[in-house]
Image: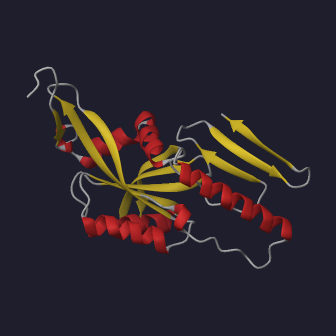
Amino acid sequence: MDRDLGELRLLNVRYKWTNEASEFTPWLAEEENLSKLGSELGLELELENTEVSVGPYSADILAKDISNGKYVVIENQLEKTDHDHLGKAITYASVLDATAIVWIASDFTDEHKKALDWLNDHTSEEISFYGVIIELWQIDESKPAIRFNVVSKPVYIARQIKVPDNLTETRKLQLEFWTKFRDRLAKCKEIPNVQTPRPQYWYDVSLGKAGINLSNIANTYDNKIGVRVYK
């Protein structure tokens, strides 16, 4: 072994957090950590609340994707995934009217990863599912480093856009334009996540950083296109 190089090793996540509810969830809810998770997912996450009551149960974290104002449910596990947490996450999302579910665990079974992939492929673009492995890495005796390893997320380019029958010609043109725009973004892989195209004159792009948003404009009335930056 080269003595000039350190040894990289994967630690058990309970080295840092011994309790999910009292340690990991409050840690993830901090602005810096939630923003880092959002960056990996291509979402601009802002905390709404933790331990949100849903009947006799509670959702670990309820966040909002500030790029579109929609709710995101985050379900945490400091262990391997199980059916119970998947069922709860879907229940929480339905009750809280969330459009995205983020399932975080220390390990994902092949079956649960395939379940999320299947849900992304067979459900509406209005709901998205993300699977994330929380990893803790260390070089020799250095401080541990956190990695959010995204193992499942929507592949929007594979989804079909359903065109309503009552759209005007202008709306149809807008939807066609933004659909092609979205597909090009997805192919270049520079943007980690892209939103669903809609029949409107604007299309927002999340940069994965809270507080910064690009709004692309296609003005069919003046025949102009442009980009606006919001902070």
Residue 33 vertical position relative to residue 157 in the rendered view, above or below: above
Quarter of the image where one finds residue 156: bottom right
Looking at the image, the residue that sits furthest to the right is 222
Q: Does residue 10 appear in this view? A: yes
Q: Is residue 217 left or right of residue 7?
A: right
Residue 92 vertical position relative to residue 146 in the rendered view, above or below: below
Looking at the image, the residue that sits furthest to the left is 1
Q: Residue 211: x percent and y percent?
A: 59, 36
Q: Quadrant of the N terminus?
A: top left
The residue closer to the viewer here, 85 or 150, is 150
Q: Is residue 45 left or right of residue 217?
A: left
Q: Residue at x 72, y 46 (%)?
A: 216
Residue 227 vertical position relative to residue 221 in the rendered view, above or below: above
Looking at the image, the residue that sits furthest to the top is 4
Q: Residue 20: x percent and y percent?
A: 26, 48
Q: How many marks?
A: 0
Q: Residue at x 29, y 47 (%)?
A: 134
Colour basis: secondary structure
Q: Quadrant of the C terminus?
A: top right
Q: Residue 139: x percent and y percent?
A: 19, 29
Q: Residue 27: x percent and y percent?
A: 34, 38
Looking at the image, the residue that sits furthest to the front is 2
Q: Residue at x 14, y 31 (%)?
A: 7
The residue closer to the viewer here, 153 or 64, is 153
Q: Does residue 55 appear in this view? A: no
The residue closer to the viewer here, 165 or 231, is 165
Q: Is residue 143 left or right of residue 183?
A: left
Residue 118 vertical position relative to residue 30 in the rendered view, above or below: below
